[in-house]
Amino acid sequence: MVFANPRKWLKWLPLAEWWYNTNYHSSLQTTPFQALYGFPPTQVPMGSLPHSTHTIVGANLAQRQHMLLNLKENLVQAQARMKFYADKNRFERVLEVGDWVYLKLQPYRQSSIAVRRNLKLSARFYGPYIELPATS
């Protein structure tokens, strides 16, 4: 959107901010607007465009509707791109009883291991340990 119309992006920035702040965020379990102010944001209906006798008003509404669709597409693409790169380094680990594993311990939280003088140079992983079946 910015690269398509570099001189008009400043005009549409408040609309992009409004759209972002009034959409549901799964991490917040609400919209950012409602999280900040405590009540749901007022919604502007964006269904069909109202008919206007003035051509300038109609053109502005049509341009606004087009920009909202463009914003939604760009944000969905950005989300997909971020998800792709986040999932790129992840993989499913399947461990079975009897497998040897290394443990990643945090010496500043766990007192069961000796605290080194320099935490930066201490070992990151401890082990190898064998995974034992759970006792009930």
Image (tube, grey):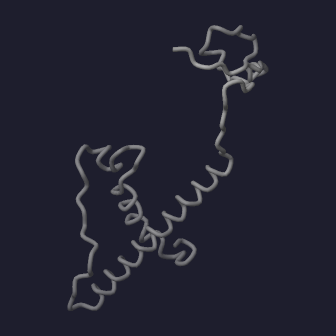
Q: How many marks?
A: 0
Provide residue 120's location: percent of width, then percent of height.
75, 22
Please say if 7 is above or below 99: below
Q: Nearer the viewer, residue 101 or 53?
A: 101
Provide residue 111's location: percent of width, then percent of height.
62, 8
52 with respect to 121 (left or right): left
Q: Quadrant of residue 50?
A: bottom left
Q: Nearer the viewer, residue 50 or 8?
A: 50
Q: Quadrant of residue 16?
A: bottom left
Q: Nearer the viewer, residue 131 or 77?
A: 131
Q: Residue at x 79, y 20 (%)?
A: 121
Q: Residue at x 35, y 77 (%)?
A: 65
Provide residue 100's location: percent of width, then percent of height.
75, 25
Please say if 125 is above or below 84: above
128 with respect to 36 (left or right): right
Please say if 113 is above or below 42: above
110 with respect to 37 (left or right): right
Provide residue 57's location: percent of width, then percent of height.
27, 84
Q: Residue at x 64, y 53 (%)?
A: 85
Please say if 45 is above or below 131: below
Q: Residue at x 51, y 76 (%)?
A: 7
88 with respect to 44 (left or right): right
Q: Quadrant of residue 91?
A: top right
